[in-house]
Image (cartoon, rainbow, N blue to C red):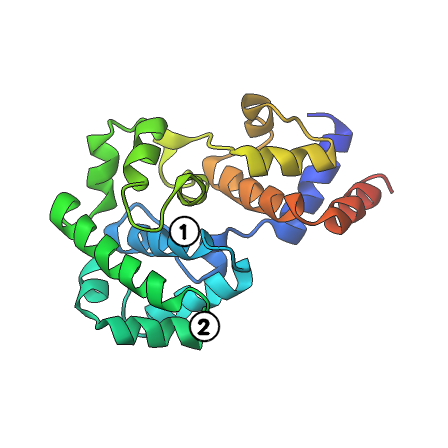
């Protein structure tokens, strides 16, 4: 890693290197509950709504006790709508409440409520995991990418997972736009997940990218 890349990387991680799961209060580990919480967050982030609102809505769902697939399934549709509303997730609240209930039921029925079983069914292959994730209501290719780039910190089988938004952010900063080269800048899978989240934020914020580049050259 060159000095300029290191300076950019250090600033990027310092300013924007918090995962979306971390921002939502999810203590991510390879356990059923936090993995399910990440799936819920990926569902909410998939809609055309700000990440801030999606994260707030996830927090309201979890605070209401809907942090496991069984609790989500057993909650009434109206309870889920109300929790989403408290997070200001209003344009998509009714549809999303239905999707979350149906998704919880699918996870319980097919994988006994444990996303590690989905991973194992896919043989740890990231492409196959991505395909299986899109079977959940509300999780399309975008949502699957969100889940994978966050979960790579605890699922080494899928790392590196750097989608086009991550690579676009790297391009804004003059970092490598090839997956392997970019992944090589991170010292661990946990740091890779943080780097991915930071680059996603920068990919849609030209001002932030410009400020980091300027600060790195001082």
> Is 180 left or right of 6, judged from the image as shown?
left
Q: Secondary structure at mark 2?
A: loop
| Quarter containing the C terminus | top right
Q: Residues within 10 Å of mark 2 (few under 14, many from 20)?
A: some
- Pick whichever of labels 2 and 1 is earlier in the sequence: 1
Marks 2/1: CA–CA distance: 15 Å
In the visual, does 167 lie left or right of 160? right
Can residue 202 be seen here? yes
193 shown above or below 61: above
Considering every residue shown, the one lying at the far right of the view is 218
Which residue, given by chain and number where applicable, does mark 2 sit on? 87
Residue 205, image x, y percentages: 70, 50
Nearer-the-camera pick, 68 or 135 = 135
Residue at (55% x, 29% y) in the render: 183
Q: Position of residue 59 (x, y in %)?
A: 41, 68
Is residue 113 visible to the viewer in this orientation of the structure?
Answer: no
Q: Secondary structure at mark 1?
A: helix
Residue 178: quadrant of the picture: top right
Foreground residue among 74 and 211: 74
Residue underneath mark 1: 42
């Amino acid at each position: 890693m060159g000095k300029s890349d290191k300076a950019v990387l250090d600033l990027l991680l310092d300013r924007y290197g918090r995962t979306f799961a971390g921002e939502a209060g999810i203590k991510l580990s390879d356990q059923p509950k936090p993995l399910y919480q990440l799936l819920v967050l990926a569902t909410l982030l998939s809609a055309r709504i700000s990440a801030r609102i999606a994260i707030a809505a996830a927090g309201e769902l979890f605070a209401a006790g809907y942090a496991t697939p069984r609790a989500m399934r057993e909650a009434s549709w109206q309870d889920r709508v109300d929790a989403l509303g408290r997070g200001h997730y209003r344009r998509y609240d009714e549809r999303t409440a239905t999707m979350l209930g149906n998704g919880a039921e699918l996870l319980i029925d097919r994988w006994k409520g444990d996303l590690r079983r989905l991973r194992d069914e896919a043989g740890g292959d990231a492409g196959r995991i991505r395909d299986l994730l899109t079977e959940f209501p509300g999780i399309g290719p975008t949502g699957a990418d969100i889940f994978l780039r966050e979960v790579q910190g605890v699922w080494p089988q899928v790392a590196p997972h750097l989608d086009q938004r991550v690579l676009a952010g790297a391009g804004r900063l003059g970092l490598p736009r090839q997956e392997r080269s970019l992944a090589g800048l991170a010292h661990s899978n946990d740091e890779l997940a943080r780097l991915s989240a930071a680059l996603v934020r920068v990919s849609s914020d030209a001002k932030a990218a410009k400020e980091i580049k300027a600060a790195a050259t001082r």
